[in-house]
Every structure is written in C-alpha cells, then in structure tokens.
Image (tube, rainbow, N blue to C red):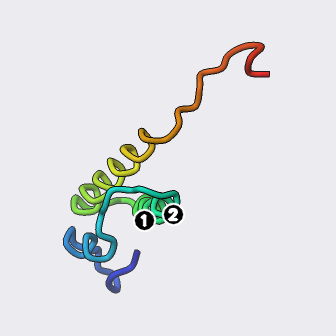
Amino acid sequence: MTLGLNKRPTYIELLQAFPPRPIKTEEELFATQKIIDSLIDSAPLTSDEKDYLNILGTLVYEYEQTQQPVPDIYGVDLL
C-alpha cells in the first residue's frame, strides 16, 4: 500500500485507503489479507500501522470463527 513517496501513511490515511468493515465473504477476506500482507512486508511498522493491522487481524479472526470448524482428526482416522 503506497500512499505517498517515502512517507508512511497515517492511521487516518490507512482507514481511508481501505476502511475496515466486518468480513462476510471470501472475496472480502482475500482483500483484507492482501492489505495485511502488504503491511507485514513493509516492516518495521509504525504505531499507526500496528494499530490498523490489529483491527484488520481482529476482523479476520471474527470471520474465521463463523466458518465451519476443521475437526480434530488423529491417528488412523487421519489416514
């Protein structure tokens, strides 16, 4: 996410570029994950970027909690 030349985006700029919303579809999940990946790739993060990343991570976590759980399978059942 490049909002300015050699300038790290502020929290407000991050919110304006990709406003966080509850994730309801796989497409929204992939779009959010793309932003998360771009932030992680630009480490070290500013405090604004860390706060924004925290919000996006929470939204992804909440979405994943609504999906079908993967059952714990061990031993012979795994095969």
Is disc 2 surrounded by few (<14), some (14 to 19) or many (20+) residues within 10 Å? few
Mark 2 lies on a secondary structure that is: helix
Which residue position is annotated with label 1?
35
For residue 68, side relative to residue 75 (left or right): left
Query: Residue 5, which numbered label?
Result: none
Residue furthest bottom as drawn: 5
Q: Is residue 67 above or below residue 46?
A: above
Residue 3 in which image quadrant: bottom left
x and y, in percent, of residue 21 in the image = 31, 61
Q: Amino acid at mark 2?
A: Glu
Residue at 39% across, 56% down: 23
Which residue position is annotated with label 2?
27
Q: Is residue 20 above or below residue 3?
A: above
Q: Is residue 78 above or below residue 33?
A: above
User: Between residues 4 and 77, which one lies in front from this camera angle?
Assistant: 77
x and y, in percent, of residue 50 in the image = 28, 56
Quadrant location, the N terminus: bottom left
Residue 41: tell me if it is visible: no
Residue 61 in which image quadrant: top left
x and y, in percent, of residue 30 in the image = 51, 61
Residue 11: tell me if it is visible: yes
Residue at 24% across, 76% down: 13
Quadrant location, the C terminus: top right
Is disc 1 surrounded by few (<14), some (14 to 19) or many (20+) residues within 10 Å? some
User: Between residues 23 and 12, which one lies in front from this camera angle?
Assistant: 23
Q: Earlier in the sequence, mark 2 or mark 1?
A: 2
